[in-house]
Amino acid sequence: MNFAFLSDKHLHTLEKNEDSAMAWWMQIAFETSPETNAPIPRGIRVRALSCLANSQWELKVTEDDPDTWNIDSVHRAGVFADDCAALGFVSAIMLHIGMKIRELRALPHVPEARHPRFTKLEYLWEIVETRNQEMAREKQKRDQTVVKAPNAYVCALKGCGIEGTRKSALLRCAGKCPADVKPSYCSKECQKADWKKHKLICKPNAAAKDKPHVADAPAAKTKMTIGESIRTDGKEVRIEMPDIIGGSGTIPLVSKTMTPEFMKDVRDEVEKLLVTDADKRSEAN
């Protein structure tokens, strides 16, 4: 667990007391109050278990070789998450741990993750399966909605990848183009970049120099400041990101506070990281 309120001068103390923190969490999760010897309330116990799961998950890879899984810590994280789920509590870190262990068990180069001890985490697998079913229903519902009006939910610029979770999340072309082909964009920059293609539909008789009625985009792409990466209009968008932990496939990144450009920058940086990592592996072999 990270204690963000601690000053830098106290961080070395926190590192030295990791074992003490674990001991306290264990006592809270499985025993009684050290002050009163009374049973710990369930609401506190489950949070201690969730903290224990998170602390073990943070040790999931070895310090000397980040590519090597510390399978015992992974299993301990799963056990704590399973104990927590058995008490009827579900936290985000528990779902994350369960989903990542399931992905890990499917990787051919990590046979240790398929040890029978992982099959005993029945409560953890139950909440993971329930959440997967919920996400599948949500995706099916969304896909059905998008199919009915794809131009309203997906940024029209090829390669952008940003989608709106609602129609109102994207900007629609204000021109006189037919409604059935009227595109939507995640930003004015994307609208301007797509204008050369869309102009043929929106203004077929326009001169080549005509531009869409949007604000000018920056002359060159530069590193964003914190302020430029934040949006405050409440519009929620999503983008598919490479699954850097699972090692394959994608995961959705959904946000109301990050700008589309920042989300695309994050995706692109992750993709570059994966390419660099793959190159290093090839050189090592």
Image: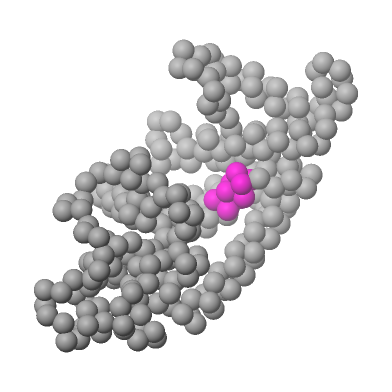
Q: Position of residue 49 (x, y in %)?
A: 70, 36
Q: Main secondary structure of the magenta part?
A: helix
Res 196 → quadrant: bottom left
Q: Is residue 131 left or right of residue 164?
A: right
Q: Is residue 229 left or right of residue 54?
A: left
User: Which color mode does the image show?
Assistant: one colour
Residue 265 appears in the figure: yes
Q: Position of residue 266 (x, y in %)?
A: 35, 50
Q: Position of residue 44 (x, y in %)?
A: 76, 33
Q: Position of residue 200 (x, y in %)?
A: 21, 83
Q: Nearest the camera: 79 or 41?
A: 41
Q: Nearest the camera: 97 or 218?
A: 218
Q: Nearest the camera: 200 or 68?
A: 200
Q: Is residue 262 magenta?
A: no
Residue 109 appears in the figure: no
**Residue at 51% from the left image edge and 14% from the top image edge:** 10
Whether 64 is drawn above or below 139: the answer is above
**Residue at 62% from the left image edge and 70% from the top image edge:** 137
**Residue at 57% from the left image edge and 73% from the top image edge:** 140
Res 42 → quadrant: top right
Q: Is residue 126 left or right of residue 109?
A: right
The quarter of the image holding the N terminus is top right
Q: Which residues are magenta?
A: 92-100
